[in-house]
């Protein structure tokens, strides 16, 4: 029952997080299932729902990192060949492709900050980092994205 409630409440966010790492829906579903199994086995107690969600995000993130480490291969993302033209300028999927191409430490904080809507303090807690480190990773990640988008797509401010 407890795992079912967690799945209903956090499943979509955890699946999106796993997919952002693994770029494959089946692997993302496997990672989510593994996270829920850990949740059932460990049966941790939490102060509130925010701590529960943070724990699940951290576990899911670690499972995905381990999957990537063990397989030592990255699957090609469905959007890897997408290059926007003027007609599709309002489609931002190419921006997320750019995020996914960044080193993991940057893409992880950018995903949690922009896509999941967490604050830098919340991200710092989830990833066991200082808040100033998270802000620095966000700043560097944005800078790398800007340079990439300018180089590849010719976008400038």
Image: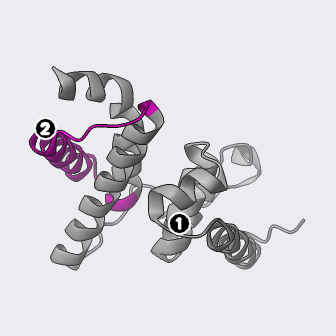
38 drawn magenta: yes
Q: Main secondary structure of the magenta part?
A: helix
Residue 36: image x %, image y %? 19, 40
Rendered image: mark on residue 70: none
**Which comes before the other along the chain, label 2 or label 1?**
2
Rendered view: 59 above or below 48: below
Q: Quadrant of the N terminus?
A: top left
Number of other residues with Cα within 10 Å of mark 2, as a class: few under 14, some 14 to 19, many 20 or more: some
Rendered view: 70 above or below 46: below
On the question of residue 31 being in view, the answer is yes
Residue 98: image x %, image y %? 58, 66
Highlighted magenta segment, given as a residue range: 21-49
Q: How did the renderer colour the structure?
A: one colour
22 drawn magenta: yes
Residue drawn at x 55%, y 43% as measured from the top left: 116
Residue designated by label 1: 107
Write down the quadrant of residue 67 in the picture. bottom left
Residue designated by label 2: 40
Write down the quadrant of residue 74 in the picture. bottom left
Q: Is residue 127 left or right of residue 145?
A: left
Residue 11: image x %, image y %? 33, 33
For this rendering, which residue is in front, 148 or 7? 7
For this rendering, which residue is in front, 102 or 113? 113
Number of other residues with Cα within 10 Å of mark 1, as a class: few under 14, some 14 to 19, many 20 or more: many
């Amino acid at each position: 029952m407890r795992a079912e409630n967690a799945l209903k409440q956090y499943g979509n966010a955890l699946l999106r997080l796993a997919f952002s790492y693994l770029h494959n829906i089946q692997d993302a579903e496997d990672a989510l299932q593994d996270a829920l199994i850990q949740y059932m086995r460990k049966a941790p107690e939490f102060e509130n729902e925010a701590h529960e969600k943070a724990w699940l995000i951290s576990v899911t993130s670690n499972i995905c990192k381990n999957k990537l480490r063990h397989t030592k291969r990255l699957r090609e993302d469905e959007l890897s060949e997408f290059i926007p033209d003027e007609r599709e300028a309002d489609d931002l999927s190419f921006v997320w492709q750019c995020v996914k191409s960044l080193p993991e430490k940057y893409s992880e904080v950018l995903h949690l900050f922009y896509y999941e809507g967490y604050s830098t303090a919340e991200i710092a807690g989830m990833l066991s980092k200082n808040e100033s480190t998270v802000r620095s990773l966000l700043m560097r990640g944005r800078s790398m994205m800007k340079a990439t988008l300018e180089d590849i797509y010719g976008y400038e401010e």
